[in-house]
Image: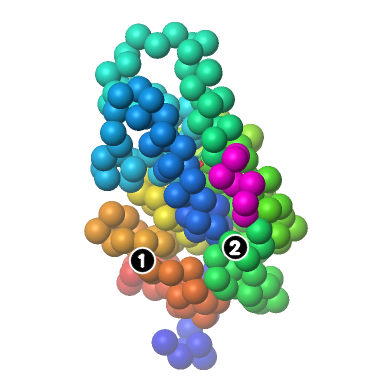
Amino acid sequence: MNSTLYTSSLQAVIFDLDGVLVDTARFHDQAWAELALGLGYVLTETDRHALKGRSRADSLEYLLEKAGWNDADPSQKSRWLQAKNARYLELVEALTPQDAAQGALVLLDQLKSQGIKTALGSASQNAAKVLQKIGLDSCFDTVVDGTRTTRSKPDPQVFWMAAQDLGYEPAHCAVVEDALAGVQAALAGGFLTIGLGDASVLLGAHRVVHQFSELSVQGLQAWHFAFNHNNT
Ligand code: BG6
Ligand code: MG
């Protein structure tokens, strides 16, 4: 689309963290799979997709139900949550700025130079640590993470908080997400929803790209223009 032919009112882009800005989704996946094995349960592909994007506590509840551990008491649950997180943090330790998604820093800089605000919208309570490890800790206009939210994706709370921090309506913001729960949260919140991954999994997303490097300021603006003109 020729940029002289339309005016996009895209004001902000909200990025999920795990699986979007850095490939930590595989670390969450591995830590949950190891915990599940300890409970005598082997995670299926469906489980792996279902766990993506959800808070740590919600993920454990999902897993316990699947594994048939319906009578675990709160102190045992708390030990499992700590064990899972300790294993995840062990895996995260090896991250460096080289692990940031290819093109992430450039896109964030380009958005900034075009006057488009950026936000992080993540369920993770480890977001600050991960951002610091990959060198993106001072790149966002606002950060909303699992230390601030009270409701887990697919609830749109995390994205609404980010939009509110920036002072924009959801209709003027785009969300980039790799998880179905995150796509559902962004759609429910009224955002232009960009899926990163497999279109057959990220059902309902307005657009789906396979790699972060396929995102560009001009592309996001064009998609946002189409979104606001019911032409996605
Ligand atoms: C999300 C991940 O970003 O954060 C989920 O996609 C994870 O897999 C959730 O469960 C919570 O993360 P943390 O770091 O607080 O355990
Ligand atoms: Mg994610």
Residue type at tag 2: Ala
Residue type at tag 1: Val
Identity of the residue drawn at 38% across and 68% down: 210
Count numbered badges in the picture.
2
Identity of the residue drawn at 45% across and 49% down: 26
Q: Any atom of ligand 2 within 8 Å of the CB at mark 2? A: no
> Is 224 or 22 nearer to us in this picture?
22
**Which range of residues does the magenta coloring cover?**
89-95
- Is 52 magenta? The answer is no
Q: Is residue 181 above or below residue 102?
A: above
Left or right: where does residue 141 sit relative to residue 77?
right
Q: Which mark is residue 100?
A: 2
Q: Is residue 50 above or below residue 70?
A: below
Identity of the residue drawn at 33% across and 72% down: 231
Q: Which mark is residue 208?
A: 1
Q: Position of residue 44 (x, y in %)?
A: 26, 40
- Is 91 magenta? The answer is yes
| Quadrant in the picture for residue 35 | top left
| Quadrant in the picture for residue 52 | top left
Q: Position of residue 108 (x, y in %)?
A: 64, 69
Q: Is residue 106 above or below residue 137?
A: below
Q: Which mark is residue 97?
A: none
Left or right: where does residue 228 sit relative to residue 49?
right
The quarter of the image holding the N terminus is bottom left
Q: Secondary structure at mark 1?
A: strand
